[in-house]
Structure formats: C-alpha cells, structure tokens
Image: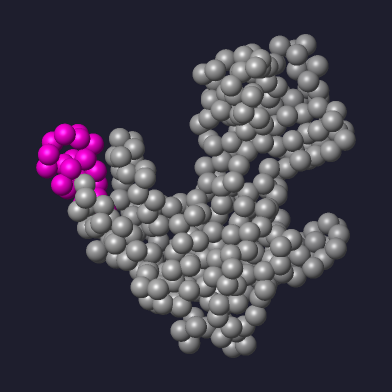
C-alpha cells in the first residue's frame, strides 16, 4: 500500500538527520540549505509488539512487518509558491504525499546555521504555512471561478454545495488559516475530495529538541503548542541528534541501555513511525502460519473483502468469507487450534469491518 508521509521543514531543521534515522536510505546531511534536492524515499517498518508476540507463539520461517513510506522533501524558503528556490519542486513533491510530517527546530546550537538567523519555530511554521496556503488559495480561486458558472445554470446540484465550501476555504486561507481548520460534513467532503489541497492533508508537527528537552519540552515547544491549538494536528517531541546516536549503536541491548540512561522507554523514531501510520488512517491485521507471520496494512474502516484485496486482488474478487481470531484470544489461548476448540474463531461475511489486530484467514474462489 503506497501511502506516503512527506517530511517537510525549512533548511537545517533536522529533516534529513531524522530521515536517516528512520530509513536505511541515507539522505545527504550537511550544514547548508538545499542539501536534499531530490526527494529521498524510505520504506520504513512499523514497530509492533503484537507481531513479535505472534511470531514467538507460531515460530514461523519468516516474519514480515507492516511498512510505511517516508519521503524527505527539499527544504522550502519564502516565495516557494511563486517558484522561489526549489519552490515548484517542493510543492509538487508535497502534493503527491498523503500526510505531512513538519519538522520544527526547537533547540539552540551556534554551530548549526538557521536560514533566518535565529531560532523561532512558530515563525518557521508560518513561513511554510503561508507558502502552502497561497498555493491552495490559487487552486481554490481557479476552481471557484469554474464552479460558480456551473452552479448558476442549476443543472448540477453538487456545484452549489461545492461553491459554498470553496468560499469557506477561500475565507480561511485569506485569513492565514490552513484548510484543515475548515470543518466539513461527510457530503461536503465528498464534493471536495478531488481538490487535493495542500493544507487539508493530515499533519504531525515534530519538535526537534535537544537532550535536555526531549521529555518535558521547552519554551519553543510551548510556543508551537499554542500556535497549533486550533488545528486538527498532532505534536511529537523528538531529539534528532539523540536518534542519530541510537541508530549508530549495533545491538538492541546497547540501544536499551542508552535509552534507560536518558529515561526513555523507546526510540523517538518508533513513536514517529507509529504516529505517521495513524496519521495515514491505517491499521494492521495479521496472518499467522508456519511459513509466515505477517502484518498487513489496510485503511481504517475497511470491510473484509477490501482487506483481503491487500493480499491479492483475487482474494477480493472471489471473497467467500473470513475466519477471524481476536489478537487477545490468540495470545491467551496460544494457537489457532486452541482458539477453534474454544469457539474463539468467528466466521465473517462481506460486511464485516476489520478491526486493528485481527488475525485473519480468507476463503475465496476465482
């Protein structure tokens, strides 16, 4: 499932350092703007303790975790919406992603140059917000001009509703607010789904902090929290430099000792990957057998045939039924056979909505 999160931010805020920690693909990292020119794509495995537990019980030949794609996008500068710097390329790359991870510098370091001369994450956020909003305003105005003419004819009832929503978007964008601050009903979302506005994408703000602030934050983090309180957005604290140190350690034990010394329970990148997964509105079901225990990614709210189609399109086309065991039942009873004997395997049809953590076996006929 090729859904992507794009990492964005001003130059030198720690995007590429963070990407390096997330992926085996090494983005070039240096102390100057536009170090990352082509977007680097990393396929990142999603940490999931449930997969480890299932593999311990089944002892399969191989284990396959879920994955999510992370894209490191070139740093943006003022004027990007008008093509300044790498603006057009930046905006094109971000439009292709499904969610945004916006990295904000929330630490002082005289050895790392800031593109605007001093640390101010709220200003940095507003710089990128403004460029995205200007591009969205351009999109909205063009669509509004076209849709208003159609609405006047009265031939398309959806056109009138679209014009109403477009005007609300226009008003918000002109006030310097992002599209995600405009609340829509389901029917309104339906008529605007092909707009692909940049500022309506789900977003996670990552506050890149130093070691002293990685647990409790600092004044910069507090300022970011205040500035995004009206947005439908998440905030995560992470120390990119710390994560880089952890990534250099060779063994799991060494990494755990390092984390314990810092008073952390897991690497920040694990939390980032898990949050990105949720940001994309994804969930996981499992298949468990002697050959393979595997985590499969599906869009939240999918019915059984659509979830089966993630494995192969034939599974969806010829879907007959799904045999479902709840994760907790599987772990408590220890095996598929034990679950069957205890009556904990349910047979579900085409209308079953798959739940996160379900262990599934599909019956199909093509």
Q: Quadrant of residue 169 in the image?
A: bottom left
- Residue 21 appears in view: yes
Q: Compared to 233, does 159 lie above or below?
A: above
The verdict on residue 168 being magenta is: yes
Q: Compared to 45, does 64 lie above or below?
A: above
Which residue is rendered at x = 51% and y = 31% of the image? 301
- Residue 354 appears in view: no
Which residue is rendered at x = 51% and y = 18% of the image? 351
Image quarter (top left, top right, bottom left or bottom right) of the N terminus = top right
Which residue is rendered at x = 63% and y = 59% of the image? 41
Image quarter (top left, top right, bottom left or bottom right) of the C terminus = top right
The verdict on residue 157 being magenta is: yes
All told, the count of numbered labels is: 0
Left or right: 217 as drawn, with respect to 340:
left
Q: Compared to 103, does 150 lie above or below?
A: above
Left or right: 159 as drawn, with respect to 342:
left
- Which region shows up in magenta? 148-169
């Amino acid at each position: 499932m090729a859904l992507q999160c794009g990492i964005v931010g001003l130059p030198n805020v720690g995007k590429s350092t963070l990407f390096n920690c997330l992926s085996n693909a090494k983005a070039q990292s240096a102390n100057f703007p536009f170090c990352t020119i082509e977007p680097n794509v990393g396929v990142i495995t999603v940490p999931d303790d449930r997969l480890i537990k299932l593999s311990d019980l089944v002892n399969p030949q191989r284990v396959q975790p879920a994955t999510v794609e992370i894209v490191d996008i070139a740093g943006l500068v003022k004027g990007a919406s008008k093509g300044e710097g790498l603006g057009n390329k930046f905006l094109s790359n971000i439009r292709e992603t499904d969610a945004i991870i916006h990295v904000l510098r929330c630490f002082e370091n005289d050895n790392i140059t800031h593109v605007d001369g001093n640390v101010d994450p709220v200003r940095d956020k507003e710089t990128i917000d403004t460029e995205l909003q200007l591009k969205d305003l351009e999109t909205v105005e063009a669509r509004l001009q076209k849709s208003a003419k159609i609405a006047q004819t009265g031939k398309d009832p959806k056109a009138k509703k679209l014009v109403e929503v477009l005007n609300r978007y226009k008003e918000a964008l002109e006030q310097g607010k992002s599209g995600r601050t405009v609340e829509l009903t389901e029917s309104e979302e339906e008529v605007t789904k092909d707009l692909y506005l940049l500022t309506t994408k789900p977003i996670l703000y990552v506050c890149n902090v130093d070691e002293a602030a990685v647990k409790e934050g600092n004044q910069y983090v507090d300022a970011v929290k205040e500035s995004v309180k009206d947005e439908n957005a998440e905030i995560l604290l992470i120390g990119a430099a710390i994560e880089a140190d952890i990534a250099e350690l060779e063994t799991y034990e060494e990494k755990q000792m390092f984390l314990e010394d810092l008073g952390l329970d897991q690497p920040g990148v694990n939390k980032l990957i898990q949050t990105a997964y949720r940001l994309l509105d994804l969930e996981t079901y499992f298949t468990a057998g002697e050959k393979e225990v595997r985590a499969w990614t599906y869009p939240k709210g999918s019915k059984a045939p659509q979830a089966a189609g993630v494995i192969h399109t034939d599974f969806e086309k010829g879907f007959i039924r799904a045999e479902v065991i709840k994760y907790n039942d599987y772990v408590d009873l220890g095996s598929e056979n034990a679950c069957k004997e205890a009556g904990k395997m349910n047979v579900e049809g085409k209308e079953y909505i798959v739940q996160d953590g379900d262990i599934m076996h599909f019956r199909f006929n093509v």
